[in-house]
Image: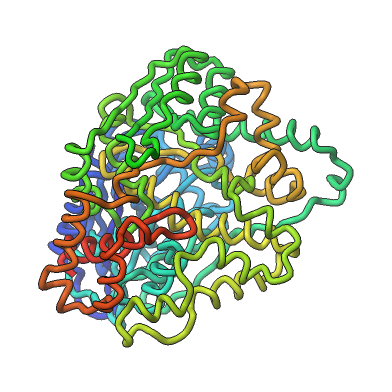
Amino acid sequence: MCGICGEIRFDDTLPAVDRVARMNHVLFPRGPDGSGIHLAGRLAVGHQRLKILDLSEHAQQPMIDSELGLGIVFNGCIYNFRDLRVQLRALGYRFFSDGDTEVILKAYAAWGIECVNRFYGMFAFAIWERDSGRLILARDRFGIKPLYYTESSHSLRFASTLPALLAGGDIDTDIDAVALHHYMSFHAVVPAPHTIIQGVRKLPPATVRVIDADGRSRDHRFWRLHFGARPEEQQLAYEDWQEITLDTLRRAVERRLVADVPVGVLLSGGLDSSLIVGLLAEQGQRGLNTFSVGFESVEDEAGDEFQYSDIIARHFDTDHHQIRVDSARLLPALQHCIQAMSEPMVSHDVIGFYLLSQEVAKHVKVVQSGQGADEVFAGYHWYPPLRDSSDPVADYANVFFDRDHSEFAEAVHPRFVSEDFSRAFVAQHFNTPGAQRPIDKALRLDTQIMLVDDPVKRVDNMTMAWGLEARVPFLDHELVELAARIPAEFKIASGGKGVIKEAARSVIPNEVIDRPKGYFPVPALKYLDGEYLEFVQDALARPAARERELFRDDYLKRLMAEPKKHITPLRGSKVWQIALLEIWLQQHGI
């Protein structure tokens, strides 16, 4: 796991190495174990390394293979790299390192851009060809690893984070109107290629971009998710799907053990992370490091789920670390947490992941996490009503959107009000072939869009802020493809995630499986009061906020009059959502 950045020029000007160095410096927390910058003609690249595989200097990046005329900077992990190395050696390729980075280089030499189809893992990388001057950018199937870029007619710059690109300067920092609509309506989910900043874009997941030396580029989407059982699976019973699912998840968890350092687990106390712990124990892991975080309760809303994580820790005899965060620690850390966001992320549990990762990084460099199971296996409350919906776009928007278009128009400055971009985006996605039933359309949207730019981005940003690598077995692409073939009725059974719940009974205690569904609660950011409300009020009253004129004064006054009452359908604070965006913009000097 690392941070990557670079600049390629399409004119006769050399890239600015000092610009790349500034970007690389911002990426330091993502890879504090090594640093490198490489200049090759009209290309300059930077890399910050977190040592997980092949801890020697042989795997240092930027990595150059002079014999092949190729170079690479890479962020991520290819879990099946050893199997691929065997195949590549049989083709005559020789290796000078023992990690996965060199395997990507050789795989590209052997199979071209189609090499990504062979990768099990998470990745964002840039490969350059010495002789042609061509640059190849790629991002994994679920966008687990980020890749941002800014481009003009004469250059393109890329980086693992948006703030790193800002450090390079010369970027249009106007607010993107489409992204603002998504942020305010689509629960702060801003789908690629947009970001809240007009001059910064992000490479979509499952995409390879080939950029020629003259600046011309083309995108190749290498993976799509299709719903519906195969002909040979039509007669499978509920119990059959449970068995197949558990076996596939076992392989996914086992794949994510590949490391030359210990691997722990973020144990929330929910079904998904508990099942990961159980499967690791089943595979012989002993003394496993597990970690949970909790906050103070507010207005009778519990701030932790320790009672459930403790059950799993005791049952499997893990080396469990329980992290309690009091309010005195939360507010100061919140500002650093916002600084670590590549994009403004409104979910309250971002600060939870940030503080949890700070503690976890003191013990391990790699953790497995349960993100993705709710989107992949239908764990959320809005899926059952969509099973037979006659108007799936409207029904989805009613339960997921934070506000409708009319309220959006009341909230923001008139210059940002035009089309209902968020509703149109959902309608377009639902109309794309590959998912026939309304519930499958929603599951596909959440798996390929919402998941990428909410939970997945949140986990990457907050863990990498402390040099911690998070692996997500529920986003193993074989498991996700399997889940898409399982009939929706089996997934929404038992109150959601039925297939997973029933399969888990052979692995973990029933009291964790049958518990009420929980969320990662941070009540202080939902029911704003006291110093938290003052923090918000101060940010919105600053000259930067006044000059920006993002939000209408009458709307802000309405929210501020009763901040605890303005809660979104997904149980978030509308006041916090607005304030978070403004604070993020201020912290990044925008």
Residue 136 in the image: x percent, y percent?
42, 63
Q: How is the image coloured?
A: rainbow
Which of the 4 image quarters holds residue 516? top right
Residue 405 in the image: x percent, y percent?
47, 78
| Quadrant the C terminus occupies | bottom left
112, 305: nearer the viewer = 305
Q: Is residue 162 above or below residue 557?
A: above
96, 542: nearer the viewer = 542
Q: Is residue 389 above or below residue 299?
A: below
- Residue ID at (66%, 42%): 495
- Name the outermost residue toward the left: 543
| Quadrant the N terminus occupies | top left
- Residue ID at (63%, 48%): 378
Residue 38 in the image: x percent, y percent?
23, 55
* Residue 247 in sight in this render: no
- Residue ID at (53%, 59%): 206
Q: Is residue 187 above or below residue 56?
A: below
- The number of callouts visible is 0
- Residue ID at (50%, 20%): 312
Is residue 561 toward the left or the right of residue 567 in the image? Answer: left
